[in-house]
Image (cartoon, helix red, strand yellow):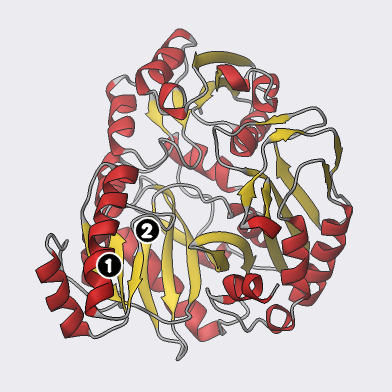
Amino acid sequence: MFSKILIANRGEVAIRIIRACKELGIKTVAVFSEIDSESLHVRLADEAVCIGKAPASDSYLNIPSIISAAEITDVEAIHPGYGFLAEDAHFAEICESCQIKFIGPTPENIRLMGDKMAAKQTAKKAGLPTIPGSLNVVNAKEEALKVAKKIKYPVIIKAAMGGGGKGMRICHNDVRLVGAFLTAQREAEAAFGNPSVYIEKYVDNPRHIEFQLLGDSHGHVIHLGERDCTVQRRHQKLIEESPSPILNRKMRKKMGELAVKCAKSIGYVNAGTIEFLLDKNNNFYFMEMNTRIQVEHPVTEMLTGIDIVKEQIRIAGGEKLGKKQDDVEFRGSSIECRVYAEDPEHDFRPCPGKITALNLPGGLGVRVDTHIYPGYEISPYYDSMIAKLISYADTRRLAISVMQRALEEFIIEPIKTTVPFHSKVLADPSFLRGKYSTAFADKMLEKK
């Protein structure tokens, strides 16, 4: 096992990794930007190194600075968390070339599944159903029109190297397609440094279901069940739950087995997630693979009792998975609300600033993953997620009740947050029945 690990991230995920390391008896090194000098992850780590100015490009995305910090503190491994460099194959290669273990998948895994078209072809070869669309990237609007004519409208344009809704456009006719195609290319270039896009049939009002995977370097892969990530705003997840209220046992078994099969086909190592779209007729399609730990991993941990970050570290250390598929037990129901420093009443406008009053919820069945504290200054430079609130109970209805109570206890002043919006979602009859789609959150916002 490693004796010291550097965490190439910030915020709640950095704290999450520090906690896992402490419980494993591993020393930690935090890196931080100048503006993050008073952040909680800096205080909790055994050592801390400033790696640059506030902009992420000068700090958390600055590979030379991070590697220098790793070398001067003599660490054996780097955990990238999620976001920033977590899915950067080049960064993973540099770590390995410097004899520093990258706690994540291999550079080959990251590169293959980070290319959406290559990932789709890989999944199709492994036997997973895929959404009809272009077989390769589409480079010209004339080609885009041909694809749309073949698969019929509505269609969706997606960035080949992207995520988070960037470079994504829905089109219902030729006129819209031409303009959206050029816009998507420009957006993809700006966000990912690559203008490549592809086109798929648009699945109207789907469910978004993902399966958590763990693979070791000895050829073993298991899944830890699914998470329903359907409550989204503009393709950004807001609420996740497990198990999904829409899946039956047969579907769960089939989707899980196919996700494992896909990961095994590429020799996948460490934590990853296969994401599916489920249409109104319960047909499911491979969407993409995330080659990192997910923001929403706590709901899976609550159901299985498996610490996913610890498993990542053990796998990177060369250990075999501690469980076989039949050993994984799923108990109860769990829900996660992502708390953002944003104002839902004004189109989710970011609300940076100093927290003067804070009360974090507690009690049986409540978990809060956060890096904030009274007096903490929320920076405008980074993602506005400031906490993850997770509830757990024996049944879904009880988990909802626990979450509703916890949201009432969550006080953050004077910052505007998404807590009131989450309360509205959890009280909505459609959510209570488990009958909702990816359009659900946007429709709720239109009603106000």
Residue 298, position as x, y percentages in the image: 64, 53
- Comes first in the chain, label 2 or label 1: 1
Residue 388, position as x, y percentages in the image: 68, 50
Cβ atoms under marks 2 and 1 closer than 8 Å: yes
Residue nearest the observer in this picture, 404 or 275: 404
Residue nearest the observer in this picture, 234 or 306: 234
Residue drawn at x 74%, y 78% as measured from the top left: 428
Q: Is residue 214 visible?
A: yes
Picture disc at residue 123: 1
Picture disc at residue 289: 2
Horizontal side, residue 155 vs residue 203: left or right: left
Q: How many marks?
A: 2
Residue nearest the observer in this picture, 423 or 398: 423
State the SS at label 1.
Answer: helix
Quarter-wise, where is residue 123 in the image? bottom left
Q: Is residue 122 visible?
A: no
At label 1, which amino acid type do we have?
Ala
Residue 164, position as x, y percentages in the image: 44, 54
Q: Is residue 445 above or below residue 43?
A: below
Horizontal side, residue 248 vs residue 51: left or right: right
Q: Quadrant of the C terminus?
A: bottom right
Q: Residue furthest top?
A: 72
Crowdedness of circle 1 by 10 Å Cα count: few (<14), some, many (20+)?
Answer: many
Residue drawn at x 61%, y 70% as measured from the top left: 441
At label 2, which amino acid type do we have?
Met
Residue nearest the observer in this picture, 74 or 90: 90
Q: Is residue 95 above or below residue 348?
A: above
Horizontal side, residue 194 vs residue 26: left or right: left
Quarter-wise, where is residue 132 in the image? bottom left
Residue 167, position as x, y percentages in the image: 33, 56
State the SS at label 2.
Answer: strand
